[in-house]
Amino acid sequence: MGGILTSLNTSYTGLQAHQLMVDVTGNNISNASDEFYSRQRVIAYPEKPLVLGNNVMGRGVDIQSIQRIHNEFVFDRYAKAAQDFNFADTEFNHLREASSLFPDVDGVGLYNDLKEYFNAWKDLSKSSNDSAQKQVLAEKTRIFTRHLQDVREKLSTLQRKASEDLEVRIKEVNDIGAQIVNLNKEIKKLEDNQAYKRANTLRDRRDQLEFNLRELIGANVYKSKLQSQGKVDHDSVDFEEEYVLNIGNGLNIIDGTSFHPIVLDKEKNSNYLNRLYLQGYDFKQVEITDKITQGKIGALIDLYNDGHNGTKVGKFQHYIDLLDSFAKGFIEASNAIYAQSATQRIESSPLQIEDNVAFRDSEYNIKNGSFDVIVYSTDGDIVAKKTIEVNEITTMGSIVKQINANTDDNKDNNAKNDVNNFFKAYYDNETKKLLVQPLREAEGFFIAIKDNGTNFPGATGINKFLEGDSAENISLNYLYQKDATAIRSWLAPVSGNFEIANMMQQMQYDEIEFYKNKSNVNKMKLSEFYQFAAGRVATDTQGAQVTLDTKKAVLETAKKEHLAISQVSIDEEMVNLIKFQGGYAANAKVITAIDRMIDTLLSIKQ
């Protein structure tokens, strides 16, 4: 029933409500500098009224809840823009460092060293017996090959650093994931949908952690039964009942109050690069390296991954593969030419092939065709020439048999002036080297191999000028490192012959074969392939910069949209503070008036 005490209670509820409004407004102002703090509002409704006869009388104000102003959909767009930006930013910063290894400046870089190398061969062709010029050629060769090794090693270092950086980032992800799960537990304890209890501060903290995690690894967050809070703010959508966060398009790492950590393992990789595994409820680990494509971690994997176990080949590994293909093509083309220079015996590099295995079943890029084994006299005259056939079933054993075969190589019906009368071939499955040695060394005959399109001498390293099979191990033959004067510029072993030097410097204008594996061979000039490789790095870097600029603009737009909804406005809060303070003062005056009325009533009674 209404009365003076009812009036007192009505004003008291108003006093409490406005006190709370002042407190919430003060809290908003205190946290105005926190980007992830969402401004809060007190939700208050009139109390259920009293019905007095034909009159309905209000009983004051009922505080329903304190709600934050937050739009989950807008925040999701902001987090998505942030994870895209961090991917682009991480990739660009690493690619910019890689592009610095290929300077496009006259007189600087690998391309200039390559030109100096060919100029040294050109100079040697003008003075084929000049020991000093051979020393210059050896030095130019060392400079170029060392520079090529150095660029590859620096790319490998960038690759390893990206893999090591991943370790730090994954630790952050696991720490953040564990914190989110703990917050989910606390939120579940504190909140009550029926009583409109809201854990606003905990939700803000979880949003910040979720945002940071998405920057790191990218994620999709699913929240069921979201509620619109149009009575508070028409843009506000918040409060879910179920929470799931997954990565890699469907891999749950947070399911409510359960967390599945990410595990790293580099022991399973030959290059000692990190692989990612997700640990499930049964503690079994499932590899997810190839499935992480977003955020900083996605960018790092996109950069360093080496294609292990059929996964995607990262950009750094692709650049390394291009350098290796460049070096391999350069080595084999150079050695194929140099094998034509006559010497007293033939020796190949150690090979990874048994004498009964067909070349087509091996890793060596040896094609069908033929090559010539040529024997020279000390005067430089051709004494004998045998053509060796290579086909689908040719093995190293059959090569040896063909060289040693008693055939009429010169077609003159003379059984004493054929290749097998001067030299004998051997192939040992233990040393795995092809050897062709003189039968009578004292006679001083020379031997050489001229290829007719098989790539046999280049692929097997016959009497090689260059060692190695990649940019990692390319080098000048150790024999010429010790004694540069032993370098042969001749085709036939006579004074004044400089045909090999001519062919070597001409190689820069010829198309040669470049490949990582023999199933994918590209044929182009040395300069063209190098420019293709260097251009790929430059193009990727430039593309990453353009993408970064675009993602940055999108991020700034999404951030403004989010902050326009949730950020605290000092001006707005100060206006509210004055309004709520006025309401508090008005209710206090009502209470004062009622207090005087009670005093008057008590004095009358006395």
Image (cartoon, rainbow, N blue to C red):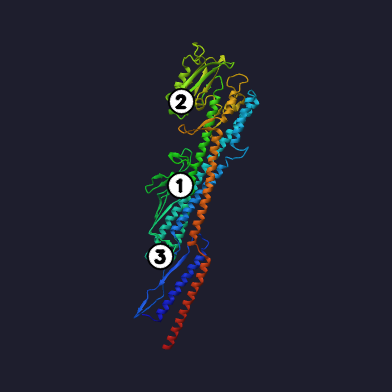
| Contact check, label 2 and label 1, Cβ < 8 Å | no
Residue name at image x 45 percent, y 22 percent: 397
Q: Quadrant of the N terminus?
A: bottom left
Q: Residue 376: where, in percent of width, then height?
A: 56, 17
Disc 1 residue crowd, few under 14, some 14–19, many 20+, Cα 10 Å: many
Q: Which residue is mark 3?
A: 197
Q: Which mark is residue 293?
A: 1
Disc 2 residue crowd, few under 14, some 14–19, many 20+, Cα 10 Å: some
Find the distance from the CA under tag 1 to the CA under tag 3: 38 Å
- 120 lies above or below 440: below
Q: Which mark is residue 368?
A: 2
Name which residue type carries label 2: Asn
- In this rendering, the label closer to the viewer, 3 or 2: 2
In the displayed structure image, the side of residue 77 where residue 131 appears, left or right: right
Q: Which mark is residue 165?
A: none
Helix, strand or loop for disc 3: loop
Q: Earlier in the sequence, mark 1 or mark 3?
A: 3
Q: Quadrant of residue 191?
A: bottom left
Q: Earlier in the sequence, mark 3 or mark 2?
A: 3
Q: Residue 147: where, in percent of width, then height?
A: 58, 35
Helix, strand or loop for disc 1: loop
